[in-house]
Image (cartoon, rainbow, N blue to C red):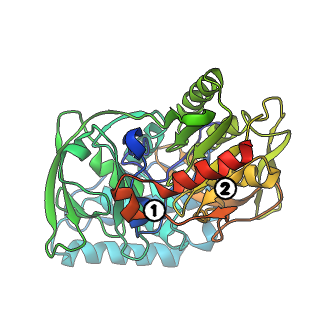
Amino acid sequence: MQNQYSDGSHLENNQSGNKGNHGNGSTKYYVLGMITGALAAFAVIFLTVSTVNFYRAVNTASGSGEHSESIISFWRNSRNENSESLQAESIINNGTEKKLEILEDTIAEYFWQDVDEKTLEDGLYRGLLDALDDPYSVYYTSEELIALQEQTEGIYYGIGAYISQDLNTGYVQISKIIRNTPAEESDLMQGDYIYQINGEDMQGKDSTYVVSKIKGEEGTSVVITVIREGVSEPIDISVERRKIESPTVEYEMYDDGIAYIQITEFDLVTSGQFEEAYQRAKAEGMKGLIIDLRSNPGGNLSTVCDIARMILPKGLIVYTEDKYGKREEYTCNGDNEIQVPLVVLTNGYSASASEILAGAVKDYGIGKLVGTTTYGKGIVQKVINLSDGSAIKLTVSSYFTPNGNNIHKIGINPDVEVAFDAELYQQGTDNQLEKAKEVLAGMMH
């Protein structure tokens, strides 16, 4: 399976996590219990990729009265040249063509501003995907697709912040800020809602679209207008874009041989970073392991499977089923099954690929989950490239844990439930991590 990755949301380029300090009883773990927005496009698993022929639109016309030419020609050419493969007869017919022409001419005559045809054309495609009423099914322009593909590299030019989609407000929210980045140096705060970017309203915008507007050339600046709880007016914050290198794994060795590995996201670089940390833990005498998946939005499917193969016994890691009942399995040979007690930390923002790993650990009984119930993202998206450089992302199947559990909108319950105490954290104590240490110590004796 090629090009498997997640959009999750996304760090403003879907990369790293918020890094803090482990010393003196504190950890790099952020105040997760304060986050109130629901994840939306967070950490969708993509199973890329097939390519569909995309008919060239007629060159853009200019001037009033010619606005329907490029858009309507696309629909007409699509129907005439390949109506069977596109099943165009269901929605592309004389009636819809005529209505599109009327709508386009009406916009051209009455709308108070000029609108270029590319914007209207992209709006048609977005609208078709929006009609599915599925927040995970999205149309991407070629520029947005490039940004999406760059999300798996671990290096990008941006500001250094994670965002998540809040379905209630329609805005994305800053869920984490990465240490030593322009976002941290600015006045941006975790929990801020992104209201505007360079003056453009972001309500209802897909998180990938928001990402594409935040990213940009190194050294340039972006003005992010945020809505902040307790502040009556929106706040304009200018942030310089810089090269952001995104470590997705952090390692610590605690007393009594307890190793701690946090995975902030499953990017292409993550399996190598995890293996390096895991081998280091072994070399330093690891007697038990804590894997921290709190607020990990998910990511690359092949990456989480590679990591799972470093610790799981022989058998299924996860399997998917589409609407036709077709099943695809991802397996582990069991050659590297973990030999020490294991605890996995989870919370309500542990989503998608994080739930694949946590679910497999729980189903095989090789470790205990500590924290709170995971997000419940159990559906799979496929990115389908179109020959003009654009793409669509569609929800295509559900995934199941090794024991056949469908966790979508349900999540995975921890073995030991403990809510995050933000007040204690402010005082330097991560109560969930301390509980994980306590549980692990009991398993080690």
Work out how far the residue at label 1 is from the one at label 2, CA to CA, in angstroms: 42 Å
Marker disc for residue 161: none
Q: Does residue 18 lie above or below 278 as drawn? A: below
Tell me which corner region of the image, top left, top right, bottom left or bottom right, holds residue 273.
top right
The answer, for residue 154, to whether it is visible in the render is yes
Q: Nearer the viewer, residue 87 or 12?
A: 12
**Tally of numbered tags:** 2
The mark that comes first in sequence, 1 or 2, is: 1
Residue 368 spot, x, y in % from top left: 71, 53
Identified by mark 2, the residue type is Leu
Residue at left offset 66%, top offset 71% = 410
Q: Nearer the viewer, mark 1 or mark 2?
A: 2
Q: Does residue 432 lie above or below 309 as drawn? A: below
Tell me which corner region of the image, top left, top right, bottom left or bottom right, holds residue 4.
top right
Residue at left offset 53%, top offset 74% = 133
- Relative to 298, 317 lies left or right: right
Q: Which residue is mark 1?
A: 125
Identified by mark 1, the residue type is Tyr
Residue at left offset 31%, top offset 69% = 203
Residue 195 spot, x, y in % from top left: 25, 66
Marker disc for residue 369: 2
Q: Nearer the viewer, residue 82 or 288?
A: 288
Element marked by disc 2: strand
- Quarter holding the N terminus is top right
The answer, for residue 81, to whether it is visible in the render is no
- Relative to 9, 254 lies left or right: right
